[in-house]
Image (spheres, coloured by chain):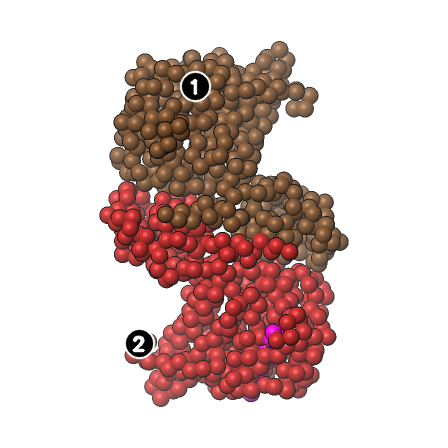
Chain colours: A brown, B red
Amino acid sequence: MSTLRPTEVPHGVTAAGGYRATGVHCGIKSSPEALDLALMVTDRGCNAAGVFTVNRACAAPVRYGRQRLQAPPADGFRAIVVNSGVANAATGARGEADTAATARMVADALGLLPEQVLVCSTGVIGRFLPMDCIARGIEEASRSLEAGPGGDRAANAIMTTDTRPKQTAYRVSVDGVTFTLGGMAKGAGMIEPNMATMLGFLTTDLPLPAEWMQTQLRWAVDQSFNCITIDHDTSTNDTVLLLAPPSEGDRTPADSVAEAFQMLLLRVCTDLALAIMEDGEGVHSVVKVMVTGAESPADARLAARRIANSPLIKCSWNTGDPNWGRIIAAVGNSGAAFNIDKLVVRYGDQIAFERGCAGSATRADLVKAGRQPRWTLHVDLGVGDAEGYIYGCDLSKEYVQINIGES
Amino acid sequence: MSTLRPTEVPHGVTAAGGYRATGVHCGIKSSPEALDLALMVTDRGCNAAGVFTVNRACAAPVRYGRQRLQAPPADGFRAIVVNSGVANAATGARGEADTAATARMVADALGLLPEQVLVCSTGVIGRFLPMDCIARGIEEASRSLEAGPGGDRAANAIMTTDTRPKQTAYRVSVDGVTFTLGGMAKGAGMIEPNMATMLGFLTTDLPLPAEWMQTQLRWAVDQSFNCITIDHDTSTNDTVLLLAPPSEGDRTPADSVAEAFQMLLLRVCTDLALAIMEDGEGVHSVVKVMVTGAESPADARLAARRIANSPLIKCSWNTGDPNWGRIIAAVGNSGAAFNIDKLVVRYGDQIAFERGCAGSATRADLVKAGRQPRWTLHVDLGVGDAEGYIYGCDLSKEYVQINIGES
């Protein structure tokens, strides 16, 4: 990848050729300046891949999206519409009807078939979509679609508790093939079932076969969006969608191009995942919990996740307090196999624990390592050679203040 | 049980006849007024039952206690010594040696065999026990053992971040048999691997067979101490011990007496568990999460635990914010089977969610129900007739303040 030197390019979902987008205010959010409806359109029918929340109480648009992707339209997907402010979750049959109606309205406005339109929602759970606003928004958005800067407006319109839009895009040339992959995301950390949902949208101009896209997206999401945790909640609406023009004869790109795409996909997803993390509510410190020496990758991930989700450990990360006893306790509770006499805990490169006892680092060394805004906690379980990681963050008084919903 | 009318009696572990106890300051805690070593002694050899932490990184005294209980001494257990201030966890071979040495010192001071002595520690992880303090403390404690008020001093000496001692005891008469069951506990909520450990000690004068005691204690702990959660951490030192004189020929008590004992054991354990809960760091609100309509008791407990451990839900409990969308999301993530169209969520008796949509309660109704210091959140999963519960609590800014360890 380093030899490929991908170039960073602007505009996220409209960075690649063949895509137009926009964001408008249609009245779902109360502030008249707040954009609350995004529309993305492709100039030709596209293949789509999607990864959805595993929450079994998923929202109407998630059920709709899953069905659409299972039976893709003959002429390909042409549009994605996203509203922010209302999640359309916990809304029963009426919620399902509202999602279908939204797709129909986009199809009517743009001269498409309803099955060519994907629909996402994000916002408050348990409220019905204000369909008159949605109708007005779609009407207006369909007239302001634009390549380039249109993507920036779309990234703005999908925000809820986000403090800033999240976009990224890269262009790369490999063996005579040049392609662009861009994306946008929203989410103040996968963490807010009130203003719910982590959403991600990726677009490329590299022609790809549908099934291969799905495999690649699943892999990249597992290594990026599924590796961040702010609290241990998974929302009802989490969705990541990838659009690409269909390849001729459903052919996979040549090996070198395929590999460049995989690497770029992981990079775009990781950029967006860390942007979500760093915009998390009350987050001061992002910690990569790297677990090595595990019996299996699953065990490594289990231990890393347990550490990253412990409220006590998260509290200690808020101030850089080197409370490694809490790390040992979390490993012991994780279910992962470990050998206490070979377990090693490092804050950065400072050894906090080894050979069953406190390690060589002084308290000051550990405090210094743990006070960085981004740092790595390294835990070696001492029983194998598998590894895995999770990005976690501190738990702060601001997080509690934001989420107590004093009202 | 209601027809039995148990009488509440004072002094916790010394409420039953045949037990003496004390608490002294030996210098483990820095404050000269702070008691930090408790000693309990039985006048005759007793049977002991124990339930220990499932944390696989358990402390030296936990490993020691498990071994002792597996090979009980021929003449029965005679003493329990507990120090607070240092957990003797993550201390390797030296920690094991220190625990064994502690038992030997108690045996020497009281003329017992070392295997007749059980040892518990609670406090900071990763430090070695100050054995000179322990020696001095055991010496002094062995001279101040006392029935009655001695138990109160012991309850005081096992505290770490607790703001108050936790004791309870009841006496009951059934079919001509009168017996007493008392206990003490420490723990500001199972939640502090810094000043680690939930500990509980129970004593009775009812003669019991060892194996039956173990079964009863396991059951009662599962229904009480294992039903509270402040954060989702299990410490390295959690231990509950029950002492009783051996019954003749290892006979189980008559049915009516056995049943009275079971009920009283559950009551004592529940009293102590809720006392730990209400003394939890920064806890304002204790919520019983009652899950009904589950496919299995395990599923009910799974859903209840997921709800009670969600940081977002815990934040909303801090102010009584009726954020039931978070409850739906947690149920969806729990892994428990449910039917979204039959799922019912009640705050007290106010219906927040039913038939897939918002229920009949107004926001004001829900706020009122959720602002009680103790209230029940009732979730019916709509797929079976099994049930289960967990006691949870709110997440507050004080909790974060206490646990960020600014130092």
Q: Residue at x 58, y 81 (%)?
A: B22
Determine whether label 1 and label 2 are within 8 Å by CB: no
Inter-mark Cα distance, 1 to 2: 69 Å
Specify start and end residues of the magenta stretch as a single range: B34-43
Q: Which residue position is annotated with label 1? A: A21
Q: Is residue B252 above or below residue A110?
A: below
Which quarter of the figure has residue A359? Answer: bottom right
Please give the chain letter of the residue carrying mark 1: A
Residue A44 percent across, percent down from the top left: 42, 13
Residue B344 included in the magenta stretch of the image? no
Which quarter of the figure has residue B70? Answer: bottom right
Residue B227 percent across, percent down from the top left: 43, 62
Q: Is residue B246 visible?
A: no
Q: Nearer the viewer, residue A202 or A144?
A: A144
Residue B40 included in the magenta stretch of the image? yes
Q: Residue at x 41, y 16 (%)?
A: A145
Q: Which residue position is annotated with label 2? A: B2
Give left or right: position of B7 versus A293: left
- Which image quadrant: the N terminus of chain B? bottom left
Give left or right: position of B359 versus A168: left
Pair 1/2: label in front = 1
Residue B208 percent across, percent down from the top left: 47, 80
Q: Secondary structure at mark 2?
A: loop
Q: Main secondary structure of the magenta part?
A: strand
* Residue type, label 2: Ser
Q: Which mark is residue A65?
A: none
